[in-house]
Image: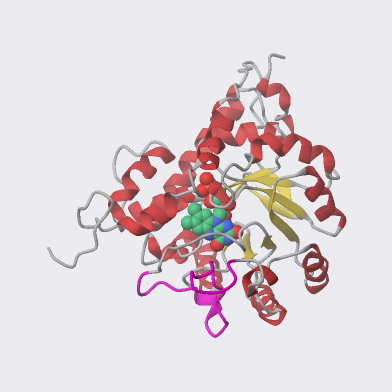
């Protein structure tokens, strides 16, 4: 069939399924099936890390190298996964990380993800680069929450724009649409990206705003230094400015050092996401898991640390919480599940992960999140 979009195996992209296929038992199953349902370039863009993919691989190794200590006989009759974060109650310590351009995976894109998040009482962070507008996504979430009688927090992720008035306009729009927190991503303003968006997929929130160039072109005199891109990269002054602009909880995403975390907290960050952007920015960067204990020690106890990059199993969540995270975020798997079966896929994927997490808590004798400490990683 000529003209049909091809997947990574060179076959026509399979249409999303209307229901969850049989035999899906883990996030890895969605990861395996998803490539059939996505166009080859979009798939490569989603899965890739930077350069040699060292950090991408290291993110997983850091989780896999930790061993858990089973602890039977705990009383689980009152067990719960409830957590309070930035003044908001979450049913369990997981949020969907901001992932741009979700229409690359499914025509319903972020609308389907938002509905699934509400159905599973899970927090969702909507990207500046969403392929539906932030208002459309908030509307879909609120309609789903009303229909189902269930909801989860909806947060907005800000990529700083070259002009402050444009950043401010995004913040005001997010506030007006009912978003409950602002996540400011600071690690990916300067990053290589050569992925050309296909027709029909755009940064819906940025219509009418100047688009920032991702990399220099060969013929220009400057490569990165001296360019507008470098000049507009976020700085500590921007954090001070942002703190003054909104009353929403302000969360800084993309820090990996104790020093930076302490400084962010001092300047008024309400929480920090320890993240290397899923291995997509600086190849060779440390994994969030290995720097988490030092960061936890450097930041006041009332400032929660969230963690992402490489989380794929309920036991990963337990390990991150054991080392000091208050919650984790999940990136690529939401796109895998979306590509395979749209909203049903994302809801089912979240169900699988939550079931794994509860099992991991039970098997390590943790009836509540406060029971999860470094002891679950060692013989008590
Ligand atoms: C991202 N991430 C991201 N982060 C952000 O703050 N704003 C964004 O728009 C995006 N977009 C985006 C697109 C794609 C395709 C990927 C894979 C990732 C990073 C994301 O929020 C998160 O930090 C990582 O995805 C976490 O790693 P895992 O779970 O994918 O391993």
Q: How is the image coloured?
A: secondary structure
Give the image location of residue 242, x and y in percent.
78, 69
Give the image location of residue 241, x and y in percent.
81, 71
Q: Where does the C terminus fall, quadrant-wise? A: top right
Q: Is residue 249 above or below residue 164?
A: above
Q: Main secondary structure of the magenta part?
A: loop
Dividing the picture into quadrants, the one containing residue 189 is: bottom right
**In the figure, is residue 95 to the left or right of 294?**
left
Residue at far left of view: 1
Give the image location of residue 231, x and y in percent.
69, 71
> Quarter for ligand 1?
bottom right
**In the figure, is residue 136 to the left or right of 71?**
left
Q: Is residue 135 above or below residue 145?
A: below
Nearer the observer, 76 or 193? 193
Dividing the picture into quadrants, the one containing residue 311 is: top right
Magenta-colored span: 198-223
- Would you say residue 237 is visible in this rendering? yes
**In the figure, is residue 219 to the left or right of 301?**
left
Q: Is residue 200 magenta?
A: yes
Dividing the picture into quadrants, the one containing residue 160 is: bottom right
- Would you say residue 311 is visible in this rendering? no
Nearer the observer, 29 or 351? 29
Q: Is residue 124 above or below residue 224?
A: above
Nearer the observer, 213 or 350? 213
């Amino acid at each position: 069939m000529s003209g049909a979009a091809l997947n990574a195996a060179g076959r026509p992209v399979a249409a999303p399924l209307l229901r969850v296929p049989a035999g899906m038992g883990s996030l890895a199953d969605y990861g395996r099936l998803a490539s059939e349902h996505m166009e080859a370039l979009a798939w490569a863009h989603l899965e890739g890390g930077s350069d040699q993919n060292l950090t991408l691989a290291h993110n997983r190794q850091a989780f896999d190298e930790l061993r858990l200590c089973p602890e039977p006989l705990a009383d689980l009759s009152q067990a719960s996964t409830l957590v309070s974060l930035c003044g908001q109650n979450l049913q369990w310590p997981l949020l969907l990380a901001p992932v741009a351009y979700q229409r690359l995976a499914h025509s319903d894109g972020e609308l389907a993800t938002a509905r699934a998040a509400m159905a599973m009482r899970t927090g969702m962070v909507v990207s500046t680069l969403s392929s539906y507008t932030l208002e459309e996504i908030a509307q879909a979430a609120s309609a789903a929450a009303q229909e189902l009688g269930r909801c989860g927090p909806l947060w907005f992720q800000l990529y700083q724009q070259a002009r402050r008035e444009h950043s401010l306009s995004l913040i005001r729009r997010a506030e007006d649409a009912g978003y409950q927190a602002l996540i400011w991503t600071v690690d990916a303003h300067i990053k290589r990206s050569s992925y050309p968006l296909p027709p029909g997929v755009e940064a819906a929130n940025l219509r009418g705003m100047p688009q920032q160039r991702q990399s220099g072109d060969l013929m220009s005199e400057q490569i990165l230094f001296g360019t507008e891109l470098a000049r507009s990269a976020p700085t500590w002054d921007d954090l001070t400015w942002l703190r003054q602009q909104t009353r929403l909880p302000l969360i800084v995403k993309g820090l990996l050092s104790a020093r930076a975390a302490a400084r962010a907290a001092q300047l008024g960050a309400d929480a920090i996401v320890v993240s290397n952007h899923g291995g997509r920015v600086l190849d060779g960067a440390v994994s969030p898991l290995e720097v988490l204990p030092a960061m936890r020690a450097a930041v006041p106890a009332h400032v929660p640390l969230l963690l992402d990059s490489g989380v794929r199993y309920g036991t990963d969540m337990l390990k991150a919480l054991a080392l000091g995270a208050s919650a984790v975020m999940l990136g690529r798997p939401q796109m895998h599940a979306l590509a395979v079966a749209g909203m049903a896929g994302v809801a089912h994927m979240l169900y699988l992960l939550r079931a794994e997490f509860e099992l991991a808590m039970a098997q390590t004798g943790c009836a509540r999140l406060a029971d999860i400490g470094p002891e679950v990683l060692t013989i008590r």
